[in-house]
Amino acid sequence: MHYGERGILMGFVSKSFITCGALVGLSFPVFAAEGALVAGVSFSNRYGATGNLGLEFNDLFNETTQARLGFRSGENGEEWNAGLSTVYGLGETALGRETSLQFGLKASVSDWDVNPYQTENYEFNFGVGGNPTEMLSWYAGAFFRHDSLNNADDGLSAIIVDDLGSSEAYGLEAQLTWSDKDRAEVLQTGSVLSLGIATTFSNEDYRDWSSYNVRGETTVGAFGQSVLFVGLGGGAVRSKSDENRIHVLDRIFSNSDLPRGFAWGATGPIDPVTDDALGGTRYVAGTVELMAPLPRPGMAVGAFVDAGSVWDLGDLASDGVIDDDYDLRSSTGLSLIWSSNHGRLRASVAEPISYNDDDDLERFSFQFTASF
């Protein structure tokens, strides 16, 4: 499964991009909601130069319902997305404090040059969550997805060709998280541990699988006001059908953030003929970073060592042509973080230490988001 698509398989995800956005509050009533017009431009190593326009609504129908609609277009493709979510609080129950029912709808259509096909994704999820203690939270629910892969490029990898067309996946998922850390603070000490599992019940198009992931991180004081951050995560998705095969939409793809210094998909199996990223069924990622504050409030500089890998295609690599062995990639470098009321900046310069000769390296990454 792609990192972050459901938040149940992957422990690390982000994509390097530059974004300058304008957030303009509007005082017009939409079903008694507070609305905002969001506009901006961006540049990324994956999507190129893009412009985006969107609408966001809070308190739609009731104080716990949010809706969004967005469109992004650029020289390397375009996409649109929409979402609706609502939370119904149940208060304190036998399941814990702040127990709530949660419902969500999501839809997206994406067509970018980085992927050799167009994707359409529609998802509905519902579940229940709670907080047994101040630091412990949990969620358990069900999901239904309808996906389509269309308009494939010529010369598409044969491993992906069999996944073209429409397919569906539905199942159950659960997440347990313990945290005593406020992620909004750049140098705050504390720890986070999360465990996730999911399973589907579909025998269609190799979409019957079970998955798990675990992620732990801790930030401790070092010397002066500096801190040491250590993070480690891993997981897998396993086929439940007779054929040991996972659909491309459910496989794991590495991103350009862990390990830093490598492009999207570079730390996993690649088709040697078409150069298409194929993803894998197992992953591991870790980082150690020493961070120190700069004179400007909310700004810090760090030195890091990253390592990670995605591997194992099951029966898809049985012919020996595709290299899906475990090959740990690693890098070291410097990072800069700045967080303020108007936005957040992350930049890094990385030098790969261990890598394969055909890996797509990306030594510099930069991400900036802002709202005004």
Image: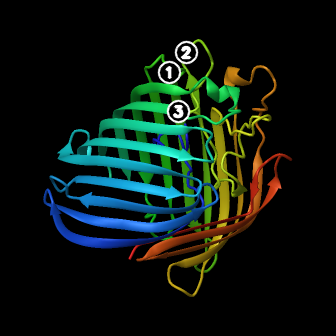
Q: Which one is earlier in the sequence, the residue at label 1 or at label 2?
A: 1
Q: Is residue 20 visible?
A: yes
Q: Which residue is mark 1?
A: 208
Toward which corner of the image does residue 161 lie, by quadrant?
A: top right
- Of residues 270 and 51, the one nearer the viewer is 51
Q: Which residue is mark 2?
A: 241
State how far apart marks 3 and 2 are (Cα).
Answer: 21 Å
Q: Is residue 17 visible?
A: no
Residue at x 54% of width, y 86% of height = 296
Front position among marks 3 and 2: 3
Mark 1: secondary structure: loop
Above or below 309: residue 190: below
Above or below 282: residue 199: above
User: For the view shown, which residue lies furthest in the right direction?
Assistant: 357
Q: Is residue 194 left or right of residue 98?
A: right
- Of residues 177 and 22, the one nearer the viewer is 22
Residue at x 50% of width, y 49% of height = 193
Mark 3: secondary structure: strand
